[in-house]
Amino acid sequence: MTNTHHDSESTTHTDSDHFDADPFGSDHVDSGDGASSYDDTSYGDSDRPSVGEMQLAERSALRRVAGLSTELTDVTEVEYRQLRLERVVLVGVWTHGTAEQAESSMAELAALAETAGSEVLEGLVQRRDRPDPATYIGSGKAEELREVVLATGADTVICDGELTPAQLTALEKVVKVKVIDRTALILDIFAQHATSREGKAQVALAQMEYMLPRLRGWGESMSRQAGGRAGSNGGVGLRGPGETKIETDRRRIRERMAKLRREIRGMKAARDTKRTRRVASSTPSVAIVGYTNAGKSSLLNALTGSGVLVENALFATLDPTSRKAALDDGREYILTDTVGFVRHLPTQLVEAFRSTLEEVADADLLLHVVDGSDPLPTEQIKAVREVITEVLRETDAPPPPELIVVNKVDAADPVVLTQLRGLLADSVFVSARTGEGIDKLRATLAEVLVRPDIEINALVPYTRGDLMARIHSDGQILTSEHEDSGTRVRARVPEALAAALSEYRVA
């Protein structure tokens, strides 16, 4: 099948942020809006354009973003129809930050679209002081977007931001294809990847919370009243203004949401029981947090030797996975892999996954995994910390201590790694894929995790194997010797276990 490749030629660029070069390409052509191209010399103080001129120029800056097309070129028409990939055009509004940040956000949106099962045909970005309140990119640019949709044969437009219901409807009327925003895209990916009963319920609740204010219909199907045999008055018990179809749908969604909340509360109780049991055992708990696809599951496997699913995809892990691991000194700890975060994570998801993310609040240590191969790793750190702050906001407990682990050093830019080593002096740099730095990480965990603080000498009868098992799992055995009446052991143990061993203590 032959696909037309669109070049990355950019249209008008503005200099409102005083960049020295066009971040979206070196070619500059007239945009068709009457705004002319510019050379890449910096403005002097005397000839800097006014704010009004910059704002006027910004509204003509809908530009192609190079390198986002994922069009398939080596498949036949039959193969393409079998794939049934949704053909999408991406569009974003760049309101603040650097050009690199704007490009990174669009590249992430393209990766999200591919994860959802779409084929990215084109990526467009507009420089504005703020999104247009009516159509997100402005009425003129919406018409240009319509031309791009027609030229590429796209059937969906994905916006890099959360659109209001009014913006969604207005833009859809202009481009005449389906329009979704970043939030709906992430919710769709979560719906595809949820496997457990609780995960599916949480995603369904988040989708309904997002959908409720955006219910809309076409023609009379959403405005007709429910009627009965008697016609417009609805018959016995149904006379009066009646209930429109859209009101019926909203009521059913609210009822379903209430049921899901009850189910999630019930599942949360079971999770709380397991977590309470883990806390009571005094076994240290370590929660792995980090940006999506930073390599959290790979790190869990490297530390524990377990076979947790590892996939090079965004949000491959939605359900928390806990595994027991041992330090070099024999102490055991619980390692929990959590859902990955992303910039602008929908508030509906944070709320729906709050019970899952409570693993973070109860942890003794946060293992914050950062993708060292990402062009903007510090932005990842900032986004993850924002979500953690949101999760911990309703708890009175202070945030757990954090250990940053920079992963994928085998694929990272050496210059970026050098900068990170200067910025993150106490971090550990590893490669979960090759094993580089894993031994150092284990040694750091042994130093960071609190050691049991009570030393005991006890003669434990052979009939109390349960106590010996707790000493092995929760404490640190210094010496042990088998005697006729039991095991003489000297160990450092938690306070609760020391109390349980009090009757067997010896001098």
Image (tube, rainbow, N blue to C red):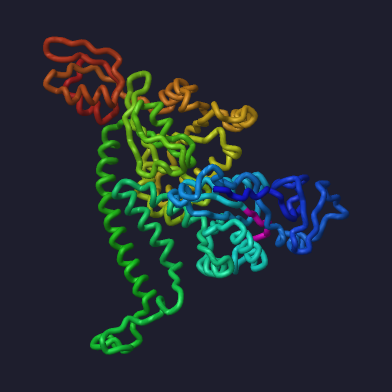
Looking at the image, which residue is at 44% across and 39% down?
A: 289
Above or below, 369 against 349 in this view is above
Q: Nearer the viewer, residue 6 or 130?
A: 6
Residue 83: x and y, percent? 44, 48
The quarter of the displayed image where residue 238 is located: bottom left
Above or below, 418 against 19 in this view is above
Residue 233 falls inside the magenta stretch: no
Q: Which residues are magenta?
A: 124-131
Residue 383: x and y, percent? 53, 45
Position of 343 compared to 480: left or right?
right
Asked if one can make out residue 134 in the rendered structure from this viewpoint, the answer is yes
Residue 321: x and y, percent? 34, 38
The quarter of the displayed image where residue 414 is located: top right
Q: Nearer the viewer, residue 10 or 136?
A: 10
Looking at the image, which residue is at 86% across and 50% down?
A: 44
Residue 128 falls inside the magenta stretch: yes
Q: Which quadrant is the C terminus positioned in?
A: top left
Looking at the image, which residue is at 40% across and 62% down?
A: 209
